[in-house]
Image: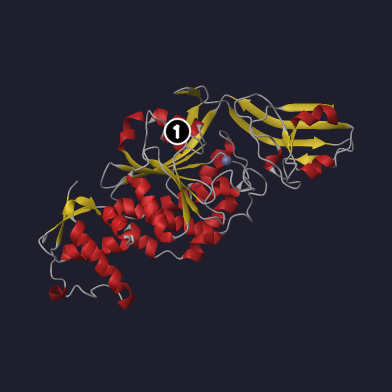
Amino acid sequence: MTIGEVRSSLEGETLGRQLYDCVADLYPICRSITGDGVRETLRRLQRLTPLTVHEVPSGAEAFDWTVPREWNVRDAYVKNSQGERVVDFRRSNLHVVNYSVPVRRRMSLAELRPHLFTLPDKADWIPYRTSYYAESWGFCLSQRQLDSLPDGEYEVCIDSSLAPGSLTYGECYLPGELTDEILISCHVCHPSLANDNLSGVAIAAYLGQALSRISRRHSFRLLFIPGTIGSITWLSRNEPMIPRIRHGLVLACLGDGGRFTYKKSRRGDAVIDRAAQHVLRQLGDHEVQEFSPYGYDERQFCSPGFNLPVGRLSRTPHGRFAEYHTSADDLDFVHPSQLADSFAACLAILEVLEGDRTYMSQNPKGEPQLGKRGLYHAIGGLAQASANEMAMLWLLNLSDGEHSLLDTAERSGCDFAIIRNAAAILCDFGLLKEVSM
Ligand code: ZN
């Protein structure tokens, strides 16, 4: 089975439900850049895709960075004078500032206030905050919750630990005919946030599952890593094989209702950039962003010492939806059908990367006579016939050993899958011959 066959056999409703169930299963887990939440997440993903879990000890050097101490949290709360939990980690793991150092104290509201974070404009939402690289502690709560707290004494507890341990990441390597690799990466460090980035995690896991079951030309490597420190750590430990990465895609924020956004690699004209743009054009309304050194792990893969051809696929980009990094990025914010469409878009992009070939016309002087070979209306129904004929004519014209199927798809405006299918037929009739690049 090939990627194209997988894509055409997709049953959107079932797939959307599976992706959504994966998001919902992982949603309650309190993740961070290290700790048991990431381990539990990867353990559950191992049911879906063949994943190896790596542990890199705290203190390990990774270029200019150091793997931090491992953070775990068991409980956290603020109790009022009646002993009631007015802020409760058990209700939402966003309530505790991620990477808070342990604290157990009684204090006045005035003393507590500098440690409380709200979103005044969104009175019911809890913000998501982190403090990875500065030792501090805090609570996030809704403005409405804060406004309801009377002056008085509060009992504050964060039952966390910040201790030598390790950074955990997951890697799924699927060898193909070629050692050339396609890299797919997603971040697994956010607690209960659905779109950012359990959407990307679920899609990457199901891509791993689908890719593990098909015949592959490229080798595939899927990374499930904590943002920034995870990709830097992975790059630092895998430097010798990095030149094998020929194409790469970072997956983030793929479950919301917005149109697709593709962020180009730093190179800007890599095959992945062209393949993604071609697919999104075929799918309809979308946005293309130029590379910038801000965002997700594409910043590390595209740092100048690597300059890898890695782009990013999202729907509404981070920071451009109000729910971003708040409790409103919840299970209602992502939808099965949007997850399924995002998965299909990823597969279509991978299908281009896997299927791109270059051919030489065996009849370059004048058009070959298609009619006498029965090639007019040879494929599909009448509606498709003209698209297929145009695809054949473009292929016969551009197949001079210099233009690939993707070049032909881009220039003709025909869907890559139609171009590829037509090329296979022309090969069968001896009119095209593949050239090894
Ligand atoms: Zn984020």
Residue 2 position in % (x across, y down): 32, 58
Report the image quarter containing ligand 1.
Answer: top right
Q: Which residue is label 1 attached to?
A: 300
Q: Is residue 124 left or right of residue 175?
A: right
Going by the image, does 308 lie left or right of 231?
Answer: left
Camera-nearest residue between 154 and 276: 276
Residue 242 placement, left or right of 377: right
Q: Position of residue 63 (x, y in %)?
A: 44, 23
Above or below, 279 against 169 in this view is below
Q: Is residue 369 above or below residue 169?
A: below
Q: Is residue 212 visible?
A: no
Residue 33 appears in the picture as rendered: yes
Residue at point 36%, 46% (across, down): 272
Disc 1 residue: CB within 8 Å of ligand 1: no
- In the displayed structure, 260 sits above or below 220; it is below
Q: Amino acid at mark 1?
A: Gln
Dot 1: what SS? helix
271 or 335: nearer the viewer: 271
Q: Is residue 435 left or right of residue 212?
A: left
Q: Quadrant of residue 109?
A: top right
Q: Position of residue 418 (x, y in %)?
A: 30, 64
Dot 1 surroundings within 10 Å: few (below 14), some, or many (20 or more)?
many
When asked about the image quadrant of residue 351, the answer is bottom left
Question: Which residue shows up at 53% across the image and 48% down it?
Answer: 253
**Residue at position x 65%, y 36% in the image:** 129
Q: Relative to the observer, which residue lies in front, 49 or 187?
A: 187
